[in-house]
Image: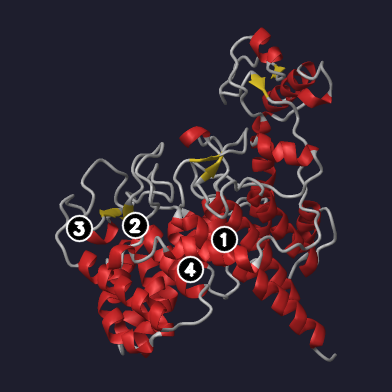
Amino acid sequence: MISAGSKFLAAWSALNIAGASAGDVCLVAQENKVDCKKFSEGDCQAAGCCWHPVDPNPQNVPWCYKKAAQKCSFSADPKTPFSSEELVEVRKLFTANINLNNTGMVVAAPDHNTPGGDYFFAWMRDGALSMNAYMQTADAFGLDEKKTTDAWLAWVERAQNQADPNGIDILTEPKFSIPSGVPYTGAWCRPQNDGPGLRAITLMALVDRNPSAADRAWKVMKQELDWVAANYTRDDGCDLWEEVRSADLFWTRFTMRKALLQGSQFASKFGKDKDRSAKYAAVAVEITKALSSHVQADGFVCEVDFRCKDAAVIDAFNVGYTDDEVFAPLSKPVVSTLSGLSEMFCNDFNVNQDAAQAGSAGVLFGRYKGDIYAGGNPWILLTASAANLFYRQAEALAQNKALDDESSKILEQLLGRKVSPQNLIGAGDAALILMKKFLTNGMHMNEQIDRNSGQLISAKDLTWNYANVLKAMKGRRAAKSAMQTAQTVVV
């Protein structure tokens, strides 16, 4: 007897075969169909798309969808994506948005007119991430760096110690006006529960470079960490893209975990506070347990159950990792997620398909499956983050970190080559070189690259772009250094 499930699968297969009458280019799995947004068979065929009615259609599968995608490749030899002169320009553009007018604030972008509105605000998340990148990627920590980080610390102190006009919690306010420093009071996705942990991480990085600031930073930091320890299960927190809310966002949970683990050590060493140290460590253990629910059977890591395929997870792998092998660069969850998102964005964006058809390596990354903001496009900061993950994988492999057989096979398929530090660097380079192809005004970088034309669109000179590009290039240098060290080891 044939089960109802088997009948459904048979019907599904037949429908797909029927839709393939124009050739295998129309034989696309339901879950991979990309909507051409044409609503008649004639318009669909005129657009060069496949027409395949699905009725009943409980999963809302598009009837008019793109033809089977060209497979993208990361098969590339290492080739330095940015020259030293270009990186000087990138850093100049980056630092122009840091400590704006000596306020200590970081402007998201010096752009008042974008699809999402005015970006001329100090987002607390962006500011914390950018200041951390500023310190990570500085050649040295001299007087200029000290002045800039001192100004940011003063800004965090000022922001933290004011009343919240929106009636939530000043620690979770998303953005503040420049130069007044008061919270934005218009409609917005708030609270943003990742802010306290991200600021704590950056404050600890600041103290690492300027130990004399420890006492001052601890007064601010313990308020942030206390909030995280008490509120990590809140269900009203906005996601990285300020669109949806959940208590169980991978980005927020993974970065909170790092803040608490580092905070536990800081509380013991600098704060001399054993109770806080123990509390932070205990909550970090609870978060670690909860993170396992994000990992699917195939290893893919979901950002949240109702928006699984989201590149926020890629940035989380980079920002939230603590060198303790939880979501390590070469682990199956990280490898599977990088592979899955690479394939998804390869299929989704015409600029990626054009590159594949031209034989160019690399993939531009967007935010998530089904994104429609400004048309739903590749983002520079996320493409740079994916490149950085490849570089981190290269570094780990050069250091003989574990790579199991299954993960190795996934990586080999993704790379189109054997897995080696050199080939992983080549993959990261390919992503950045493809992205750089669309820069048309020196190193100025808009938020997005149009999915069809490749034109730079949305917020101009986005600070987060420059932060992630600089971090990626630092990751590349670390990978090359690890390779050189491995070659000099006497066996």
Front residue of 249 and 219: 219
Task: Give the residue pinned by disc 4.
Answer: 133
Q: Amino acid at mark 3?
A: Ser
State the SS at label 4: helix
**Relative side of 285 to 162, left or right:** right
Q: Nearer the viewer, mark 2 or mark 4?
A: 4
- Badge 3 density bin: few <14, some 14–19, many ≥20, Cα 10 Å: few
Q: Which mark is residue 469?
A: 1
Q: Nearer the viewer, mark 1 or mark 2?
A: 1
Task: Give the residue pinned by disc 3.
Answer: 180
- Residue 294, position in %: x, y? 54, 53
Would you place residue 421 above or below residue 333 in this image?
Answer: below
Q: Amino acid at mark 4?
A: Ala
- Dot 3 and dot 2 residues touching (CB under 8 Å): no
Front residue of 290 and 187: 187
Cα–Cα gap, marks 2 and 4: 20 Å
Cα–Cα gap, marks 1 and 4: 10 Å
State the SS at label 2: loop
What residue is shown at x 56% (from left), y 22% (from top)?
A: 58
What residue is shown at x 29% (from left), y 64% (from top)?
A: 101
